[in-house]
Image (tube, grey):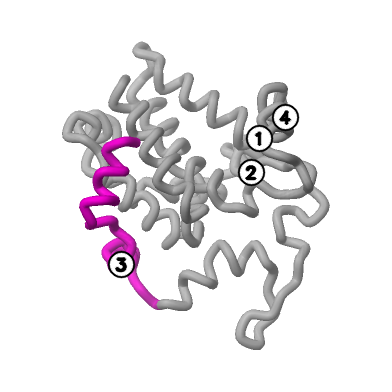
Amino acid sequence: MKAIKRIILIAVVFCFPYYSFGWGVLGHRIVGQIAESYLTPKAKVAVQKILGTESIAMASNWADFIKSDSSYNYISSWHYINMDSGLTKTQVKQYLQTDTATDLYTKMNLVIGQLKNKHLSMDKKRMYLKLLIHFVGDAHQPLHVGHPQDQGGNKIKVTWFGASTNFHRMWDEQLIDFQQLSYTQRYQSLHCKTKTCLAEATDW
């Protein structure tokens, strides 16, 4: 279980400085690939026991892919959390301490709690780990921690190279897809290789 906790910690801390990346299919895979590169051997074994031959990068979009199955409609609100604008850091913490809504924060805690259950079936472990991988990425996309008034930027209309779109879609996919790099190419360009950065990763 310590290995699972380490996976969670690496994903959260590493993603934070970048607010994650595109968070469309490509963005989630980039985040997953980077997170996987920092796993300890023990953590890798723990992940492989659950995911099998599937990598974190390839598992990272499952929570979006299953939206096509109506039996999973109940998790649609698990991808985001709404907050009022102008909150201070202290106010955000206070809000989360009393948060009982069906949202990204409460359900991430649920998923983490389920993964700690030693009696959970393998099918459930696989589902919850895939959800956690995806939700950690979502949590660090600014528009998934947004304001209900503009529906996380979906109501904010913008123009992207002459084409009409919305702020959420532009941030989710269009900014990163524009570079026309595969997720492995993008991973190579972002992956930390300096001694200083590696030392910081060890501190995490």
Residue on which disc 2 sits: 80
Residue on which disc 1 sits: 103
| Location of residue 199 in the rendering, given as x and y in whole percent from the top left corner | 25, 44
Could you tell me if the residues under marks 2 and 1 are in contact, i.e. CB atoms within 8 Å?
Answer: yes
Indicate yes or no whether the magenta region holds residue 184. yes
Q: Which mark is residue 95?
A: 4
Question: In front: 190, or 185?
Answer: 190
> What is the crowding at mark 3: few (fewer than 14 residues within 10 Å), some, or many (at least 20)?
few
Disc 2, SS: loop
Given the image, on which type of amino acid does mark 1 rest? Asp
Could you tell me if the residues under marks 1 and 3 are in contact, i.e. CB atoms within 8 Å?
Answer: no
> What is the crowding at mark 2: few (fewer than 14 residues within 10 Å), some, or many (at least 20)?
many
Rendered residue at 49%/51% (across/down): 65
Distance, label 2 to label 4, CA atoms, is: 15 Å
Give the prevailing secondary structure in the magenta stretch: helix
Given the image, on which type of amino acid does mark 2 rest? Tyr
Q: Which region shows up in magenta?
A: 180-204
Indicate yes or no whether the magenta region holds residue 111. no
| Location of residue 139 in the rendering, given as x and y in whole percent from the top left corner | 55, 44
